[in-house]
Amino acid sequence: MRWTIQQLKQYCQEGFLLVPNLLSVEEVAALNTDVPRLLTGEDSSMHREHEHSGAVRQVYNSHRHVPTFRNLARHPKIVEPVQQILQNSFYIWHSKLNVKEAFEGTVWLWHQDYGYWIYDGVDSKLMSVMIFLDPATLNNGCLMVISGSHSWGRLEHNSDTTTSYKQWCIHKSVLKEKVREAEIQQITGQPGDALFFDCNLVHSSNHNLSPIPRKSLIIAYNDIDNKPRPVEKPRPDWVVSRVFEEISWPE
Ligand code: SIN
Ligand code: MN
């Protein structure tokens, strides 16, 4: 399960690494079997965000409530590379099922995750793993990234209300200066593929204009020694977890 030196080098240079077929067809099927109960809202212990259309946009922290998702967040296929990258023990910062329903799922504007997380009182020792539960295509709003942008450091973000959902995103003037068309990479893939990425990687995604959904699970991990310091406006536990259950590998 450990990454090779070459894989680690690529991750460090580009700020991300796509691992095809990280999960088997059976593992993806087991997760997808549990997805409908995450979406229906029967279980009110999970925080949900919605599109203006009413469709579910995100479901937080399935890893706390659903065994298949709990096991996935601690699976050696994921946590061993995470430990190689973070070089320390870590805990789950949060997890979110991002749902882009066919024709309805809306955009994510350009941002860095650390653009948000800096205000939670942490340093940039966090990273995320995005596990594809559906195909991610050019038409259904696959993730887009700028290779190497994690090395730009944290960029200035501001609140944007031009889309159906209030977002914190990179300032337009900064984007105009930094982002070149030829450098935008579209991360297409199949169910079971996984994208590991740095918290300063610049990323976004388009509207789902296709007849197929684009669901993916993003699990964010934080270095165990990077627990949030007190801040003026602490965000709730569903987005900034106070469950500091340590994950280390080998356990
Ligand atoms: C995110 O950045 O959290 C979401 C991106 C996406 O699901 O396309
Ligand atoms: Mn993000």
Image (cartoon, rainbow, N blue to C red):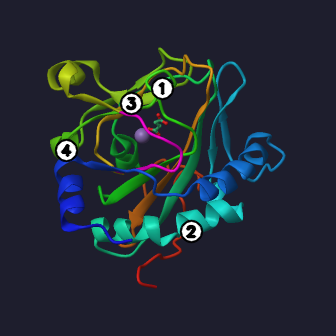
Bounds of the magenta segment: 187-196
- Residue 188 lies within the magenta run: yes
Q: Secondary structure at mark 1?
A: loop
Mark 1 and mark 4: span between their CA atoms? Answer: 26 Å
Residue 169: % across, % down? 37, 29
What is the secondary structure assignment of the residue under circle 4? loop
Say above or below: 90 vs 115: below
**Mark 3, residue position:** 204
Residue in the foreground of this view, choosing between 117 and 189: 189
Residue 17 lies, with reference to residue 2, above or below; the image says: above
Work out how far the residue at label 3 is from the one at label 2, CA to CA, in angstroms: 28 Å
Q: Nearer the viewer, mark 1 or mark 2?
A: 1
Q: Are marks 1 and 4 in contact (CB under 8 Å)?
A: no
Residue 3 visible from this viewpoint: yes
Q: Which mark is residue 153?
A: 4
**Does the stretch in magenta take in 178?**
no
Q: Quadrant of residue 249?
A: bottom left
Q: Taking 153 as reference, is 211 left or right?
A: right
**Is tag 1's residue or tag 2's residue first in the polypeptide sequence?**
1
* Pointer 1 with pointer 2, Cβ within 8 A: no
Q: Position of residue 31 (x, y in %)?
A: 66, 54
Q: Residue at x 79, y 42 (%)?
A: 41
Q: First in sequence: mark 3 or mark 2?
A: 3
Give the amino acid type for the residue marked by disc 3 in the picture.
Answer: Ser
- Which amino acid, by three-letter code, is at mark 2? Val
Question: On the image, numbered disc 1 is attached to which residue?
Answer: 141
Mark 3 is surrounded, within 10 Å at the Cα level, by few (under 14), some (14 to 19) or many (20 or more) other residues, namely: many
Ligand 2 shows up in which quadrant of the image? top left
Say which label, 4 or 2, has the lower sequence index: 4
Q: Which mark is residue 243?
A: 2
